[in-house]
Amino acid sequence: MTEATVRRIVTGHDVAGNAIIQEDGPPPRVARIGGEIGPLFHEIWNTRETPARIDRASGEPPEQSIQLAPPRNGTRIRILDIPPDDPGLAELTGEQVAAHFAEVGAGEASSHAQSGARHAFMHRTETVDYGIMLEGELTLIMDKGETVIRPGDIVIQRGTNHGWANRSGKPCRICFVLIDGAYEDGLGQ
């Protein structure tokens, strides 16, 4: 994988209503979560409502820290650079895993404590996520079954318990678009 910088280009409108390039550069929020073995989050944009507000030149709604899920009724797009799985993942305690998810405001998302969890970072959020593999490969691990995701593959993650393993020995890059969702038919329990 290249160490290419992520570039964010934001469009808007000038006072006369003409389309303009409002911003062009790296995303303002980039953070490694979980120490050296954790992924690098490039936070690209979020919206706070549906339909999304389109005005002349406002910026991205502000956030104080990296958040795993999108805002309620909103969306989020991010790029993740994920290093190869560290052998120490299997040794993480429930408290360490909970701390990892708490770093992204999602302590309740972890399912590590569940009997038979298939990966240290198994989790679930009340969202629909589009995962678009850009570089490298990941293994998507479900409660039952798994599959390898390669460049050009797109995963539609529908509020299910899952984990991501990078067993390739090389870093990978994946884009996620997260959309706030609502469980039905007792799935949220």
Image (cartoon, rainbow, N blue to C red):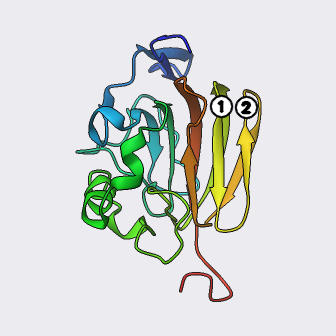
Where residue 45 sits, quadrant-wise, is top left
Task: Out of 16 and 148, give the one closest to the viewer.
Answer: 148
Q: For the N terminus, which image quadrant?
A: top right
Instruction: Classify residue 52 as left or right of residue 104.
Output: right
Q: Name the residue tied to disc 2.
A: 150
Q: Are marks 2 and 1 in contact (CB under 8 Å)?
A: yes
Residue type at mark 1 is Glu
Q: Is residue 35 placed above or below 147 in the rendered structure?
A: above
Q: Disc 2 versus disc 1: distance between alpha carbons?
A: 5 Å
**Residue displayed at 32% across by 44% down:** 66
Q: Name the residue tied to disc 1.
A: 137
Callout 2: SS: loop
Instruction: Classify residue 85 as left or right of residue 173.
Output: left
Q: Which mark is residue 124?
A: none
Task: Out of 109 and 145, give the one closest to the viewer.
Answer: 145
**Residue displayed at 62% across by 89% down:** 186
**Residue displayed at 44% across by 53% down:** 48
Q: Position of residue 178 (x, y in %)?
A: 56, 50
Where residue 153 sits, quadrant-wise, is top right
Q: Position of residue 76 (x, y in %)?
A: 49, 45
Q: Position of residue 71 (x, y in %)?
A: 42, 57
Task: Out of 16 and 76, give the one closest to the viewer.
Answer: 76
